[in-house]
Amino acid sequence: MTDSNAADRAARYRQRMQQKKQIVDASIARADQEKGLLLVLTGNGKGKSSSAFGMAARALGHGMRVGVAQFIKGRSDTGEEAFFRRQTQITWHVLGEGFTWDTQNLERDSATARKGWSVVQEMLRDTGYNLVVIDELTYPLKFGWLDMDQVLNDLQNRPHMQHVVITGRGAPDILCDAADTVTEMRDVKHAFRSGITAQKGIDL
């Protein structure tokens, strides 16, 4: 490449980046609202809970107070819980008793979910929580263990600047409609289907 071609390429690149910067700066200038966000992380792909816990870490880094409520999952030996329980600004609740195919008891699962939601309600009423992560909430909603209208009402009436992140597959359309941000994670390939067990630090 000649010096002339290299200079032309650099000039075109600089022009494109200047145009892009103008567009980005204009978008940032238009975003002038402050409010607590409702985020839904759904889809069949891996990483929904991991993404939510990443936001929890980010919030803690800003000195914010975080509450975590885990539905369905009944174990308390995961790496993320072991780490976050050492942090002083986070409250962690394991509200499930295991996956539905483990419990195999509809009445018990429903009662556990309702009891768990009462814990979440307390966090949603507490102005001291800046971020509330509700992990695997989509399953109690999908199976009808929780009343959707009640859940939406509690979410709508939370403190104005409180952020909420909800995870789980198959998020109901009505929940997605109420959310400010919805991310659907797509499953392309998963080691488990090749016979590889869940790995510490990655899956646990």
Image: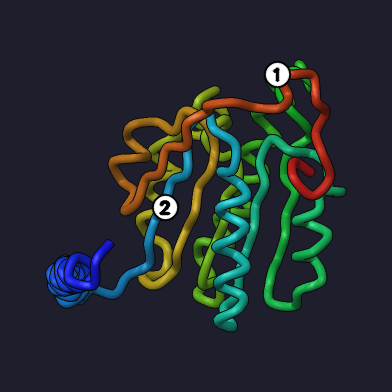
Q: Position of residue 43 (x, y in %)?
A: 48, 32
**Residue 190 falls left or right of residue 155:** right
The image shows residue 112, relative to residue 107, as above or below, that is: below
Q: Of residues 37 and 202, which is closer to you in this image?
A: 202
Which quadrant would the C terminus be assigned to in this image?
Answer: top right
Q: Earlier in the sequence, mark 2 or mark 1?
A: 2
Residue located at (62% from left, 68% from top): 57
Task: State left or right for residue 72 relative to residue 157.
Answer: right
Local packing at callout 2 (Cα closer than 10 Å; few below 14, some 14-19, many 20+) is many
* Residue type highlighted by circle 2: Leu
Taking depth in this image into account, of 19 and 139 the one nearest to the observer is 19
Considering the numbered disc 2 on the image, is that residue within a helix, a strand or a loop? strand
Q: Position of residue 62 (x, y in %)?
A: 55, 81
Q: Residues within 10 Å of mark 1 (few under 14, many from 20)?
A: few
Residue 70 x %, y %: 67, 47
Classify 187 as above or below 68.
Answer: above
Q: Which mark is residue 193?
A: 1
Q: Residue furthest bottom?
A: 63
Residue drawn where x is 56% and y is 52% of the image: 51
In this view, the residue farthest toward the right is: 77
Q: Which residue is mark 2?
A: 39
Q: Residue 55, located in which quarter of the rendered image?
A: bottom right
Quarter residue 143 falls in: top right
Q: Which residue sits furthest front?
A: 2
Between disc 2 and disc 1, the foreground one is 1
Residue 41 in view, yes or no: yes
Q: Residue at x 78, y 57 (%)?
A: 81
- Residue 182 point in image, percent of width and height: 37, 45
Residue 103 vs 77, above or below: the answer is above
